[in-house]
Image: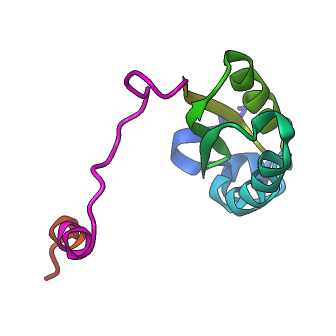
Amino acid sequence: MQEEEHYRVDQSNSCHLAGKCRLSNSFLYDRGIASTLLPVLRADPQLHDTSVWILVQGRLVQLLGCVSRQEQIAHLEAVARATPDVQAVLSSILVGTHGKPPYPRMAVLCGSGLLKAMQNKSPARG
């Protein structure tokens, strides 16, 4: 009987046990992906007029922010996909600075308001 891979359950344990993945957990790749991808994006002259940030989680790279031109989105996605160990890329990029971003936004709080908001959101301790 052939063992099935259950991606959602084990986040690459069976991949590792089968000898297909270098690390035993998808999240162990994240720091290396981010530390490789971020300097490449910062140094790329095609992206100097953008405001983009990345979120790396479980070998998945999420691109968020704004670009000046549509073709920059495809370029960002290609650079991210070419990064070693990246399994998938999701892009939530807005062209220009007008319109509603294609991702949820958090309210910006200043000073003690931020701390108070964070304390109110923390889980109850028992």
- Most foreground residue, 25 or 90: 90
Q: Whole-percent x and y of residue 7?
A: 59, 39
| Residue at x 59%, y 39% (from the top left corner) | 62
Q: Whole-percent x and y of residue 18?
A: 81, 47
SS majority, magenta: loop
- In the orientation shown, which residue stands out farthest toward the top? 70
Q: Is residue 21 above or below residue 24?
A: above
| Residue at x 44%, y 26% (from the top left corner) | 102
- Most foreground residue, 123 or 5: 123
Q: Using the rendered view, name the quadrant where residue 29 is placed.
A: bottom right
Magenta region: which residues?
96-117
Q: Is residue 72 above or below residue 22?
A: above
Q: Is residue 46 above or below residue 36?
A: above
Q: Quadrant of the C terminus?
A: bottom left
Way the structure is coloured: rainbow
Q: Whole-percent x and y of residue 71?
A: 74, 18
| Residue at x 66%, y 52% (from the top left corner) | 26
Q: Whole-percent x and y of residue 1?
A: 71, 32
| Residue at x 39%, y 21% (from the top left corner) | 99
User: 106 left or right of 103?
Assistant: left
Q: Is residue 80 above or below residue 12?
A: above
How many numbered marks does the figure carry?
0
